Amino acid sequence: MNCPVCQKPVEPVAVALTFKIVGPQATEALCLSCLAAKFKTTRERLLDAARRYRDGGCVRFKGLDLG
């Protein structure tokens, strides 16, 4: 799947973050860079959030490469 904004491949962690942040009603996922821009944050802050979700037991983030 490619990002609808920049056409780069969407990382699995970006898909997981989209569903965690936006919710199950999300119809498309942005790449990590575009997701960060949309929420006025950085890639690193999103990855930190993903790590917290994973460490907290969220199954969406289990087994994902978080850098």
Image: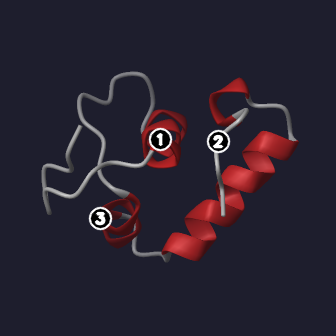
Quadrant of the rendering where the N terminus is positioned: top left
Query: Along the polypeptide, which appears first: circle 1 or circle 3?
Result: 1
Say if mark 2 contacts mark 3, CB within 8 Å: no
**Lateral position of residue 43 relative to residue 29, left or right:** right
User: Which amino acid type corresponds to the residue marked 2 in the rendered image?
Assistant: Leu
How many neighbours does mark 3 have within 10 angstroms: few (below 14), some (14-19), or many (20 or more)? many
Instruction: Give the quadrant of residue 24.
Output: top left
On screen, residue 47 versus residue 32, left or right, reads: right
Badge 2 marks a residue whose secondary structure is: loop
Quarter in which the C terminus is drawn: bottom right
| Residue on which disc 1 sits | 12
Q: Residues within 10 Å of mark 1 (few under 14, many from 20)?
A: some
Which residue in the protein does label 3 denote? 34
**Coordinates of residue 28 in the picture (x, y in percent):** 24, 35
Q: Amino acid at mark 3?
A: Cys
Task: Please name the residue shown 47% across and 75% down the image.
Answer: 41
Identify the residue under disc 2. Answer: 64
Which of disc 3 and disc 2 is earlier in sequence? 3
Secondary structure beneath dot 3 equals helix
Crowdedness of circle 2 by 10 Å Cα count: few (<14), some, many (20+)?
A: some
Q: CA distance from mark 2 to mark 3?
A: 19 Å
Q: At numbered mark 1, what does the secondary structure look like: helix, strand or loop?
A: helix
Residue at horizontal 79%, vertical 52%?
A: 52
Say whether marks 1 and 2 touch (CB < 8 Å): yes
Residue occupying image coordinates x 41% and y 68%: 36
Lateral position of residue 67 relative to residue 3, left or right: right
Q: Assess whether mark 3 and mark 1 are in contact (beta carbons under 8 angstroms).
A: no
Name the quadrant containing residue 46.
bottom right
3D distance between C-alphas at marks 1 and 2: 7 Å
